[in-house]
Amino acid sequence: ILEVYKIKYREDYTYIEFKGKEKLITYYKNTFNYNIGDTLYIKADLKTIYSNNIPNTFNYKTYLYNNDIFYNLDINEIKLIKNNSNILNKIKTLITNKINTISNNEYIYAFILGDNSYIDQNTKNNFKNNGLSHTIAISGLHISLITIMINFILKKLKLNDNLIFIITTFILILFLILTNYLVSVIRSVLMYIFCNINNKLKLNIKSYNILILIMTINLLINPYLIYNLGFIYSYLISFSLIYFNDLLKGNFIKSLIKVSLLSFLISIPINIYYNYEINLINILINIMLVPIFSYIIFPLSIITFIFPKISNVLEILTNTIENILEYTTNINLLNYDIVYDYFEDYDSLEDSVRAYILK
């Protein structure tokens, strides 16, 4: 007996996550007429998830393990036990159904529900190669923009600060649930709550100590997050930006350049470990495109969700950016393979690094 936790519709199958004593997944090729939150009786065979056979490439098995998913279901029979009765699941189903009616909805999925799996894999690779993967995932900046918009509206209604904090916190928690508790959203929402409590009670706790506390809570709830790349990027870069906050001050352009440079430098060890290369042109690309995604594409995706008729505008902008990234991906002038340029004869990354250290 399992509850439907997540549904992703594809052309030839439906990806479904179930929640019971543990999370389970399936790639269902028949028609799936159930909604998020429905409780189902499922007769199925448990299948182990196979690891990739190509060294130093994306390991889907490890990715699923880091998200508490250990088995794949080969479904033989499904029966409905109870319809979706949770109001939040009903809201999520309504939102999903509305997004499905909008053309060019990939980025709307990414920014409304935090699900960028609908974006074409080649496009996602281009974002990754240009150091822009974070722009198609809900981040602290997006939560800050949402918070600013909510506070602006509530202040126009002349509500007091405490009531504004309570209403904003409630909305952010709803958003956190709708995005399936994404690591970056958990961090951002808890930072907003804890920092406000810290200020109101005058506890004088440093922001980076609050961040460490939130990280510790996350790891106590789910220790597997320590292997999650999004978790590593999110907390490491956030800690660096908080710690070096005084150095990042300046006008908008200067601050943006400093933030992009610091984020790039801090992320170099992670990029080398996971991607085995660095691309110095990523600094310039981040400076150019991060503001466009943060202040134009993100708000426009939300507006398009409300007013679907302007989806063509969103499509034109995103297609233009995708074409730019396709072009810059092929620029290898400042792209540098850290290890394999020197040690192509070695059988593994570990052997290469060991040889590099010895040298």
Image (cartoon, helix red, strand yellow):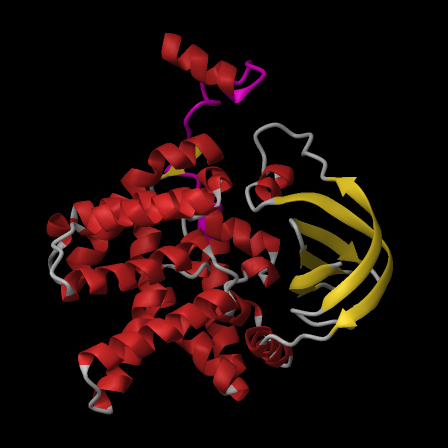
Tell me which segment is drawn in magenta. 327-349
The mark total stands at 0
Identify the residue at horizontal 26%, vertical 85% (top origin).
154
Quarter of the figure that contains the N terminus: bottom right
Return the residue nearer the eye: 327 or 265.
265
List x then y, in percent, for residue 224. 50, 40
Return the residue nearer the eye: 276 or 22.
22
Identify the residue at horizontal 69%, vertical 62% (top origin).
3
Identify the residue at horizontal 55%, vertical 56% (top origin).
123
The answer to whether residue 44 is above or below residue 148 is above
Return the residue nearer the eye: 149 or 48.
48
The answer to whether residue 215 is above or below residue 181 is above
The answer to whether residue 160 is above or below residue 277 is below
Quarter of the figure that contains the C terminus: top left
> In the visual, does 104 lie left or right of 330?
right
Q: Is residue 305 visible?
A: yes
List x then y, in percent, for residue 236. 32, 42
Magenta region includes residue 339: yes
Q: Is residue 276 visible?
A: no
Identify the residue at horizontal 59%, vertical 58% (top origin).
117
The answer to whether residue 127 is above or below residue 224 is below
Magenta region includes residue 207: no
List x then y, in percent, for residue 80. 80, 70
Picture quadrant of residue 68:
top right
Q: Residue furthest right?
A: 76
